[in-house]
Amino acid sequence: MRAVVYTRPGDPSVLAVERRPVPEPGSGEVLVRVAVSGVNPTDWKTRRSGAPPAGGWQIPNQDGAGVVEAVGEGVDAGLVGERVWIWEAAWQRPWGTAAEYTLVPSRQVARLGPASFDLGASLGIPFLTAHRCLTAGETMPDRINAGAMDGRVVLVQGGAGAVGNAAIQLARWADATVVATVSGPEKAQLAAAAGADHVVDYRRQDVVEEVRRISPRGVDTIVEVAPVTNAETDVQVVAPDACVSVYAAGAGGGLTLPVRPLMAPNARWQFVLVYTVAEAAKARAVYDVAAAAAEGVLRVGPEAGLPLHYYPLEEAAAAHAAVEGGAVGKVLILTSDGDAAATPAPS
């Protein structure tokens, strides 16, 4: 099989396509023939980290979609032939999704049904992160489904990013009122396409004024991509018992918060790293995201506010460079020339 491999940390040039034997699934594992691999910021950040791969080599990328080819001992044989999406493939394991085949624990695949491989490869990190951000608050439900957030107001800071897009889609599915902030007209169109009820251009509008106009009592949850930059705004728009869910460091140094203005509303700051989210919360997120995908309520592509950028496996370094450079939308690697990534399962 062909696989993208790196043996030392560094820039995208450390990625090389190699020929390797197709692995055999061990106990509790499944072998997936990957159709599409999704690239996330976490993938290049891990590649650039100072530590070499634990086992001497690493296939990158956490997210992907494909077909189960074989299963190991203790795994339901009925999974063979199923179209699945994969999450956290490369977390503390060498078998990422940037390869024609990958090995993952059986719990880290979910049935994709008739949805496209493009969607499947876009679900893992962004949608599981968004799910945790939306459900961490004391007044928010711990499950996401139709109607679960009726009456709640959600502010998505950075509505044109992958996690922002996922948060908008999930919150709208749950019937929340969604306000998204963006940095310009083009990104405003993307956030609106994702389903945001209100879009605020923070470079041209006063975010606090606009949010308070939309929801005078404030917002119940903030999905936060830039906590240092946005802290002052967040403090001014939180509703009683609101939660600010921080999933990225953004620019700037340490985060400073005023104590007294946040005590009165009993506000909470929740930090979210999807890999180490508690097992029960992670399981709920996987179930809900899989259910939403199966119901056809999750979308990718420009019409969903998430433009897709395709690269062949041989250009994995360019794909990583695109994400590292801040590409707007979702970067996908097609792992085999014959795979029609956007084609749904045959009827």
Image: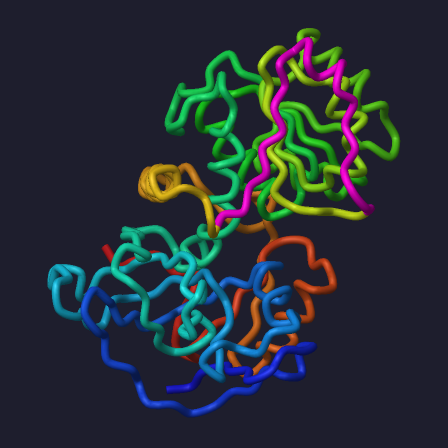
> In percent of the image, x 44 and y 67: which residue is there?
90
Relative horizontal placement of residue 241, taking residue 297 as reference (left or right): right
Indicate left or right for 94 with 33 as reference.
Answer: right
**Outermost residue to the right:** 204
Which residue is at the front of the view, 170 or 9? 9
Q: Quadrant of the N terminus?
A: bottom left
Q: Nearer the viewer, residue 289 or 197?
A: 289
Measured along the vertical axis of the image, is residue 102 above or below residue 8?
Answer: above
Looking at the image, is 102 positioned above or below residue 148? below
Instruction: Report which quarter residue 286 is drawn in.
Output: top left
Magenta run includes residue 19: no
Q: Residue at x 39, y 55 (%)?
A: 116
Residue 222, by quadrant, is: top right
Q: Quadrant of residue 233?
A: top right
The image shows residue 24 at horizontal and vertical percentages of 23, 80
| Relative horizontal placement of residue 157, taking residue 296 as reference (left or right) | right
x and y percentages locating residue 187 in the rendered image = 73, 42
Q: Which residues are magenta?
A: 252-274
Q: Is residue 285 left or right of residue 25?
A: right
Residue 107 vertical placement versus 265 (above, below) = below
Which of 294/248 is in front?
Answer: 248
